[in-house]
């Protein structure tokens, strides 16, 4: 069983503030790291698929970095808005997993006006 | 909208009932997945289908029986479930089994009494 850990488990952010949180995963046997955003009662929405060490991806005010040598990825939200409130999931994929994703438990973000 | 639909959205069943969950994807994908999320736990992969063939059974009890009649439809047949099977069941699809992004449905919230 692979350990994919996300921290913190939850965080509260004031509207307009920036925040970041972590996903840690096994540094060996890496193939890809996925980030998803999951709003309550909706489908998890894919944010990024990251495959290269040092990769940095951006979608609007959300960005992510990847360090495969030390086994972590950061997700950043710049100028948080109430619509950013969601649970953010990361999922680790190894080369021999053939589509099998190992998910973390998620970081629940609550943005208050 | 992710292009993946699931019905029903909510289901209550007794331990002796037989019911089925349905998933349909309108994305032209070839791989489909069933996931389970129990309370306070990460998403857990149950089954993977690739070009209608089951390629992964993640040690799921036989009271869960998947069926994939074509690349667009995936079913999960439920029989003699236990209360501990109460969970959110999510379907996903991807173009192929690789590092491709998986697109999720909104899930079926199942309660077993």
Image (tube, coloured by chain):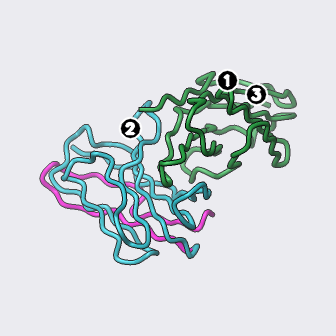
Left or right of B8: which side holds A64? right
On whether disc 1 and disc 2 are found on a single subunit, the reply is no
The quarter holding residue A106 reads top right
Q: How far separated are the C-alphas under marks 3 and 2?
A: 26 Å
Which residue has dot 2 on it? B38
Q: Please tell me the numbered disc located at residue A11.
A: 1
Left or right of A57: which side holds A104? left
Q: The chain coloured cyan carries which letter?
A: B
Question: Which residue ends up furthest to the left in the rendered image?
Answer: B16
Query: What chain letter is assigned to the residue under label 3?
Result: A
The quarter holding residue A28 reads top right
Mark 1, secondary structure of its residue: strand
**Residue A109 colored in magenta in the image:** no
Query: Within 10 angstroms of label 1, few (less than 14), some, or many (20 or more) residues?
Result: some
Left or right of B73: which side holds B94? right
Instruction: Tell me the magenta residue range.
Output: B1-26
Q: How far separated are the C-alphas under marks 1 and 2?
A: 21 Å
Query: Within 10 angstroms of label 2, few (less than 14), some, or many (20 or more) residues?
Result: some
Residue drawn at point x = 61 percent, y = 30 percent: A107
Residue A11 x, y percent position in the rendering? 67, 23
Q: How far separated are the C-alphas under marks 3 and 1?
A: 10 Å
Query: What chain letter is assigned to the residue under label 2?
Result: B
On whether disc 3 and disc 2 are found on a single subunit, the reply is no
Residue drawn at point x = 38 percent, y = 38 percent: B38
Q: Please tell me the numbered disc located at residue A20.
A: 3
């Amino acid at each position: 069983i692979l350990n994919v850990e996300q921290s913190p488990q939850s965080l509260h952010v004031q509207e307009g503030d920036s925040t970041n949180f972590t996903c840690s995963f096994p540094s060996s046997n890496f193939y890809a790291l996925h980030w998803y955003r999951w709003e309550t009662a909706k489908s998890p929405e894919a944010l990024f698929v990251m495959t290269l060490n040092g990769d940095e991806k951006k979608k609007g005010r959300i960005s992510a970095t990847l360090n495969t040598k030390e086994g972590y990825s950061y997700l950043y939200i710049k100028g948080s808005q109430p619509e950013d409130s969601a649970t953010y999931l990361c999922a680790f994929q190894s080369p021999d997993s053939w589509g099998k994703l190992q998910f973390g438990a998620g970081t629940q973000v609550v943005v208050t006006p | 909208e992710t292009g993946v639909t699931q019905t029903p959205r909510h289901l209550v069943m007794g331990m002796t009932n037989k019911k089925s969950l349905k998933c349909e994807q309108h994305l032209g994908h070839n791989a489909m997945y069933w996931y389970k999320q129990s309370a306070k736990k990460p998403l857990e992969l149950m089954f993977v289908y690739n070009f209608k063939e089951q390629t992964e059974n993640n040690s799921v009890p036989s009271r869960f029986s998947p069926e994939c009649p074509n690349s667009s439809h995936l079913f999960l047949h439920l029989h003699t479930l236990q209360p501990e099977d109460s969970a959110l069941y999510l379907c996903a699809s991807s173009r192929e089994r690789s590092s491709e992004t998986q697109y999720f449905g909104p899930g079926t919230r199942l309660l077993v009494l």
